[in-house]
């Protein structure tokens, strides 16, 4: 309760203090916006594109870049292109952003790095995984028609699985090879089952099970190779992080879900870059948008 004759002194605010307060209120949101959302060409997210020769990687790059596939030849060196997502493809990081935001279009851009699929040139892909530059995800393109049991007695499936094994193992080592207690950021991997327009192509679900089965064989083959080289069975019982062993350690079958504990998320989606009725890569576009 105030007494009737009590005087209340309210200091007059300083003009300088008011100006500083206004500047802080205006500048802090702007700075946060620039730090979180603005991206230049040097910081665009990168997707690494790899897979065996003839799977359709370079044709996919031209389709993503130009909107239509073009005649290609076997790649000898890596090359990177800047692409923009289709207008109707949602981007995970932009779900709360207004389309009127001037940085809206920038967030729809990314870099795609195509790498050679020939066995002697795959070191380019491995280098990009071990020394990533803003790597946001990996697309491993496979020829779904080359994975069937009738395709050269399963040779295509075996060779594809051997390359995929090396790629996934390299990604797994991001978690097992670090000395930090902090887990590495999640690395999404898309296995793009290409050429589904062909009659002999396996559907995406069978591509997944076929590759898991072949990867199980690769693991067993590598384990047998260690035994033949003189490594004792007691050494093979060592923890998986001490061995080049993909997924859960043991004699069981391999499954892509085993890589989740290493922050590697694998998804298999089908499509086709070329075909009599045109290309169909909508699911691959949606996957790209979901990881940006």
Image (spheres, rainbow, N blue to C red):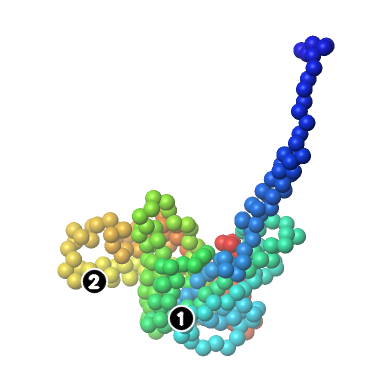
At 69% across and 62% down in the image, what residue appears? 103
Q: Is residue 225 above or below residue 274?
A: above
Pointer 2: residues within 10 angstroms few (<14), some, or many (20+)?
few
Which image quadrant for residue 43? bottom right
User: Which residue is located at x 63 percent, y 69 percent?
Assistant: 109
> How busy is the neighbourhood of tag 1: few (under 14 within 10 Å), some, or many (20 plus)?
many
**Which residue is label 2 attached to?**
225
Q: Position of residue 93 (x, y in %)?
A: 62, 58
- Is residue 285 among the parts visible in the rendering? no
Q: Nearer the viewer, mark 1 or mark 2?
A: 1
User: Which quadrant of the figure contains the N terminus?
Assistant: top right
Which residue lies at the image location 50% right of the left edge and 62% below the top edge? Answer: 188
Q: Residue at x 28, y 70 (%)?
A: 222
| Numbered label tally | 2
Which secondary structure lies at badge 1?
loop
- Name the spot of residue 267 as percent of width and height, x first: 50, 64
Quadrant of the rendered image containing residue 174? bottom left
- Answer yes or no: is residue 4 visible: yes
Residue holding disc 1: 116
Q: Is residue 263 left or right of residue 40?
A: left
The earlier-in-sequence mark between 1 and 2 is: 1
Closest to the observer, 237 or 109: 109
Question: Quarter of the image containing the C terminus?
Answer: bottom right
Front residue of 221 and 115: 115
x%, y% of residue 261?
41, 55
Element type at mark 2: helix
- Along the horizontal axis of the image, is 69 left or right of 244? right
Reply above or below: 150 against 126: below
Place residue 8 in its image quadrant.
top right
């Amino acid at each position: 309760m105030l007494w009737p004759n009590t005087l209340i002194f309210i200091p007059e605010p300083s003009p300088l203090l008011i100006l500083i307060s206004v500047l802080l209120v205006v500048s802090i949101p702007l700075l946060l916006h620039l730090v979180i959302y603005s991206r230049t060409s040097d910081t665009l997210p990168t997707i690494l594109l790899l897979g065996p020769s003839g799977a359709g990687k370079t044709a996919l790059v031209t389709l993503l870049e130009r909107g239509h596939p073009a005649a290609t030849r076997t790649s000898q060196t890596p090359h990177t292109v800047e692409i923009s997502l289709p207008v109707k493809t949602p981007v995970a990081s932009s779900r709360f952003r207004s389309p009127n935001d001037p940085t809206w279009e920038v967030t729809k851009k990314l870099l795609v790095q195509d790498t050679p699929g020939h066995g002697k040139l795959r070191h380019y892909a491995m280098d990009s995984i071990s020394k990533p530059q803003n790597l946001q995800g990996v697309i491993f393109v496979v020829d779904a028609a080359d994975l069937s049991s009738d395709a050269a007695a399963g040779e295509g499936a075996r060779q594809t699985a051997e390359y995929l094994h090396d790629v996934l193992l390299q990604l797994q080592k991001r978690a097992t090879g670090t000395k930090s207690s902090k887990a590495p950021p999640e690395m999404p991997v898309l296995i793009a089952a290409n050429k589904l327009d062909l009659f002999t192509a396996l559907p995406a679900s069978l591509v997944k099970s076929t590759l898991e089965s072949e990867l199980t064989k690769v693991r067993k083959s590598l384990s047998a190779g260690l035994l033949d080289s003189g490594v004792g069975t007691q050494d093979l019982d060592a923890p998986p992080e001490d061995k080049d062993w993909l997924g859960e350690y043991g004699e069981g079958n391999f499954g892509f879900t085993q890589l989740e504990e290493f922050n590697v998320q694998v998804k298999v989606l089908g499509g086709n870059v070329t075909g009599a009725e045109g290309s169909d890569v909508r699911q691959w576009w949606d996957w790209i948008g979901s990881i940006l």
